[in-house]
Image: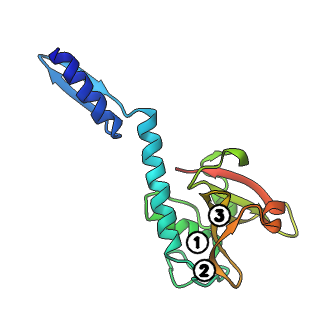
Amino acid sequence: MRMNIRSKTIRMIASLGLCVTIAVSGTLFTAAPTASAAAATTTVKADKIITLGKKYLGVKYRLGAPSGSTQVFDCSSFTQYIFGKYGVKLPRVSSAQATKGTTVAKADLKKGDLVFFKSSNSSKIGHVAVYIGNNKILHTYGKPGVIVTSLSASYWKSHYKTAKRVL
């Protein structure tokens, strides 16, 4: 019975996302985080990144905005900044950001995924946004600055290129 209680305690601690190793009577017991604990941790991080990003709604857009600035953003400086605050290092430009993480099908998007769009005049990646759920993206461009937009809006729908999971 005692071993069963210890085993349950180890699994409970591991479910919180912690790797646990304990010794009992000279025997080592290890439990790694479960897949559901890892998914929960990712969801929490995505929610924090999105919440931080939304604090900048309306901040002006400026192409080539400097890394680390919160006075102005361009699309990739915005994603680099908000993800960086939670330990996710991204390159400075959207085309380089698109080389990171795992490719995700549009139908499988999750909060926190990076969504990439082609430029108007080419098939090259020219824009990045953060998927925030419910078919919406958080990004910055043009006059509105940082904004939430529907992924189904005609421009974004027609310019969609790919998505990456970096969390």
Mark nearer the N terminus (3 vs 1): 1
Residue found at the far front of this picture: 134
Nearer to me, 23 or 90: 23
Q: Are marks 1 and 2 in contact (CB under 8 Å)?
A: yes
Q: Secondary structure beneath disc 3?
A: strand
Disc 1 marks which amino acid?
Answer: Ser
Disc 3 marks which amino acid?
Answer: Ile
Answer above or below: position of 7 versus 38.
above
Can residue 105 be seen here? The reply is: no
Q: Which residue is mark 2?
A: 65
Answer above or below: position of 92 versus 21.
below
Identify the mark at residue 77; answer none if there is no mark: 1
Residue 88 image offset from top left, x and y in percent: 48, 57
Locate residue 42 relative to residue 58 in the image: left or right.
left
Residue 82 image offset from top left, x and y in percent: 50, 67
Cα separation between marks 1 and 2 = 7 Å
Answer above or below: position of 40 versus 71.
above
Residue 141 image offset from top left, x and y in percent: 69, 77
Q: Secondary structure beneath disc 2?
A: loop
Front tag of 3 and 2: 3
Q: Dot 2: few (<14), some (14–19), or many (≥20) neighbours within 10 Å?
A: some
